[in-house]
Amino acid sequence: MTSAGDPAIQALIDAARADFARSVLAKARALEAHAKSGAWTDARREAHKLHGSAGVHGFAELGATAARLEDLFASVDEDDPRAGSGALPGGSDPSGLPGGGLPERLRDLLAEAERIARGFL
Amino acid sequence: MKRVPLGSRPSAPTRPLRPPPPLRTILVVDDDEDIRRALRLSLERIGGFSVVLAANAEQAVAEARHAPPDLVLLDVSMPGIDGPATLAALRAIRETERVPVVFCTAVSSEDEAVRLCALGALGVIAKPFDLIGLPVTVRAIFAKAAAEVE
């Protein structure tokens, strides 16, 4: 076992965090694409992954934003015809998701992902 | 020849050296590659465990059957066969029916933890977990498992 204060271990943790940060914008954009096409199950899965992995790497705010999106996607009734036409043209929110606010939440996620990615360029 | 003062000689062992404790093997099952990598870093590099990775239930069952691990750390929400169904599959195989399983989940309500433990899991670890603190938690789980056997 290695000591928690070991600089070599801290370097590994930092490297893993940087790897995640460099990939986070692509993950957020993939989630957005699923949401825009009304692929709610895929969108929920991406949000779920970001919820877990962002927090592990110390990006709590991104994790919380992803968790809010995950909750929103989880509330979709796939049999509801409004949910099936969930495209988001022009930033409107025709998804019919309970509680709404999908465009805003997606914007929050992308903004946070961009901020994180910029910090690790 | 250079004389070496007696006091500086390495002392001979007075009793046989104990063999090192066996390396505990943990099978990590998670569909998210980021989480698998993080768990390997935490448990293997920081915690000193041996880690085997599986990305889905099928891989997990095959790995566990081939070489039963000392612990399975199992994601709850996976596409296809989810964590609870994977646990049921492990329990149905003679080689893995007694392997301790701990769920790892981002859904961390107390009700959910109780539900998961009622399925036969030894415990629940909440995501996000702390990379440095996780090995300590896992060691406590091993101690709990040992106590339950005794």
Image (spheres, coloured by chain):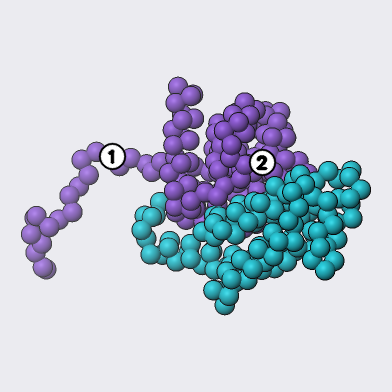
In the depicted structure, whether residue A107 falls above or below residue A67: below
Q: Residues within 10 Å of mark 1 (few under 14, many from 20)?
A: few
Spatial CA distance of label 1 from label 2 is 46 Å
Q: Could you tell me residue B110's position as x and y percent?
A: 57, 33
Residue furthest to the right in view is A81
Report in which chain the residue with disc 1 lies.
Answer: B
Q: Could you tell me residue B86's position as x and y percent?
A: 70, 37
Q: How many marks?
A: 2
Instruction: Give the color of chain A as drawn.
Output: cyan
A59 with respect to A38 (left or right): left
Earlier sequence position, callout 1 versus callout 2: 1
In the depicted structure, whether residue A19 falls above or below residue A85: below
In the depicted structure, whether residue B93 falls above or below residue A10: above
The residue under label 1 is B16
Which amino acid, mark 2? Val
Q: Nearer the viewer, residue B40 or A55?
A: A55
Q: Could you tell me residue A41's position as x and y percent?
A: 79, 50
Q: Is residue B46 visible?
A: yes
- Residue A56: which quarter of the image? bottom right
Residue displayed at 49% across by 30% down? B145
Circles 1 and 2, Cβ within 8 Å, touching? The answer is: no
Element type at marker 1?
loop
- Residue A39: which quarter of the image? bottom right
**Chain represented in purple:** B
Residue displayed at 7% across by 59% down? B5
The quarter of the picture where the C terminus of chain A appears is bottom right
In the depicted structure, whether residue A16 falls above or below residue A56: below
Report in which chain the residue with disc 2 lies.
Answer: B
The residue under label 2 is B76
Q: Nearer the viewer, residue A55 or B20?
A: A55
B81 with respect to B146 (left or right): right
Element type at marker 2?
loop
